[in-house]
Amino acid sequence: MLSLDDNSNAGVLTTTRPHSVSRRTLSGVMLSIAVLFASAAPQTLVQAAVALIEVNVKEVAQGFQTSELVGTAIKNDKDEKIGTLDDLIVTKDRSLFAILQVGGFLGLGGYLVAIPYESLNISDDGRKITLAGASKEALQKLPEFKFKK
């Protein structure tokens, strides 16, 4: 059996005969070993817990599915078609942008631009999307958006 040496060399383990080791001594040795290994173990990072928030699912269900919005014509306030909703992008800082295709035919040869999602006005049924004050010409003057590869 193992026990702690009572000398001034604290923490030194010596062997003794089994009948001379008490449960208390053995418990102390086991605790010492556990502390020794715990202090030598690599430190692990503690991650912050994510707070889950209960949402009103009925209200969320009244929103728009992006899969149904993509491909919808974008019109200006004069009811002129100025582009098509090509995609929605969520940035790393959680901002939402609409990617519009201006010009082109059947998804080919179009010019892509990014505009803040909040700039769009979507009808209650999601079938009509407008971008007030915009024109094809004004959109084509914006920097061209390219998807990262």
Image: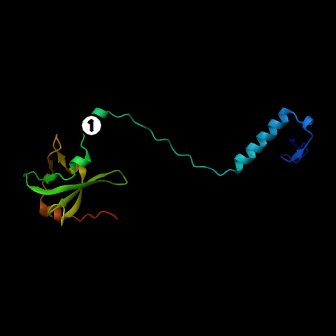
The residue sitting at 78% across, 42% down in the picture is 32
Q: Quadrant of the N terminus?
A: top right
> Residue 56 at x, y = what percent?
32, 33
Give neighbour class at mark 1: few <14, some 14-19, many 20+ (Cα, 10 Å). Answer: few
Q: Is residue 143 above or below residue 81?
A: below
The residue sitting at 12% across, 57% down in the picture is 82
> Residue 145 at x, y = what percent?
26, 63
Left or right, residue 34 beside residue 3: left
- Please count the marks in the image: 1
> Residue 118 at x, y = what percent?
23, 49
Element under disc 1:
loop
Left or right, residue 50 beside residue 60: right
> Residue 70 at x, y = what percent?
22, 52
- Kindly identify the amino acid type of the residue bearing the numbered disc 1: Ala
Colour approach in the figure? rainbow
Residue 126's quadrant in the figure?
top left
